[in-house]
Amino acid sequence: MEHIEFDYPNAQRCITNRAHVGVVGSGDMEVLFEPSEGAGAHVSITSSVNGFRDAWKAVFDRFFSKFDGSVRIQVNDAGATPGSVLLRLEQAVEALGK
Amino acid sequence: MIETNAIPAFVNRGSFIELNGRERAQALFDKGSWRELVGPFDRMVSPWLPMQGVAPEFDDGCIVIKGKISGKPAVAISLEGAFQGGSIGEVSGAKMVAALDLATIDSRDGKPTAAILLLETGGVRLQEANLGLAAIAEVIASILELRQHAPVITVIAGTVGCFGGMALAAGVSSYVVMTREARLGLNGPEVIEQESGKDEFDASDRALIWSIHGGEQRAGMGLADDLVEDSVDGIASAVQQFVRAGKPAQHRSEQVELYRRRIATLDASSQIDPLALREQWKSLNSKGRTQ
């Protein structure tokens, strides 16, 4: 198991909602989006699969190149592929808007 | 272009099995009447899984939703089959027990509250062995308490099925609803094969497994009260029907004499096949007399 954290200080847009999507099933993950306590966005990942820090970083860099919400993101992962991760994140953004 | 009427009904039906544990529970309630208790944002996670290198889930795979079904108070407890095989650990077990006990308190106070257990589970979570076992004992005790006041309805939709200690919980509940895809059994096929050998039970023979553990056989034997198609509407209406019916006059697990007699009268001189077992059990009615 690996614990990974990232900060995206430039994500400043105020978010008031929260969202939860996904299940920690094989090849999948769950993610919580909540309003950030400080300024900027903070990402915290707990993954059952070790050694993919760079892949996580690439996915979140890409995600935050479009998304600018000041959120706290928490992920529990059971081996989701980068594609699934991005889809779950986009689904969570959609759920935030509801 | 495909015409709408050319699409068979099963394509357009809303599948229940394809929903996750949370969506399944939500689908049972009257619209807008429900709320989730101890949800993922409360982060009641298993402290034991991370110690063993396993990522936890924020709801520990147990979703509790309170609301109204057919206008009557009800609580649904749904196990997420995709997370650790729907297994029962310390936290998920405690959530289940607390929900059942609160339903009992409300029922005693004159507000009968039905419990719906959506069981997709292999039983005790091995990583939390003893705590999981203790949780199963508590769950069963709480069901026995609640069922005196309000119905406890178990739904096994599939495809994980319901095995191990949670099969006992299904056994003591007031009503059991199953689909053809669902399975119910104490020991799972792999466990039986491992303990008694492939000659006894071939866990790779799916037809054999479903002919014994499957929903059709369980309903045929009278161990499930309703066999429904996999659809949101079908399962929701089966649950509504049992919520309205209230608690049964006598629970299945109280009919000790009947089941003793059924087992005693089985002709074991030749291999009993699943269909013959249904017929033999049916021939003994609930008064224990041969028809």
Image (tube, coloured by chain):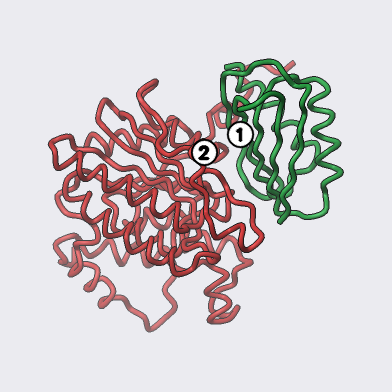
Look at the image and tell me whether residue B230 can be seen: no
Q: Residue at x 52, y 46 (%)?
A: B80
> Where the C terminus of chain B falls, by quadrant?
bottom left
Give coordinates of residue A94: x percent, y percent.
65, 21
User: Tag 1: Cα neighbours inside 10 Å, few (<14), some, or many (≥20)?
Assistant: many
Q: Name the amino acid type tagged 2.
A: Pro
> Where the N terminus of chain B falls, by quadrant?
top right
Give coordinates of residue A70: x percent, y percent.
68, 22
**Numbered disc 2: secondary structure:** helix
Q: Give the CA distance from mark 2 to mark 1.
A: 8 Å
Q: Which mark is residue B40?
A: 2
**Numbered disc 1: secondary structure:** strand
Name the residue carrying label 1: A32
Q: Name the amino acid type tagged 1.
A: Leu
Given residues B84 and A71, the one toward you in this image is A71
Given residues B72 and B18, the one toward you in this image is B72
Is disc 2 in contact with disc 1, using a CB cutoff of under 8 Å?
yes
Q: Residue at x 29, y 65 (%)?
A: B281
When asked about the image quadrant of residue B38, the answer is top left
Chain B: drawing colour: red
Letter of the chain shown green in the rendering: A
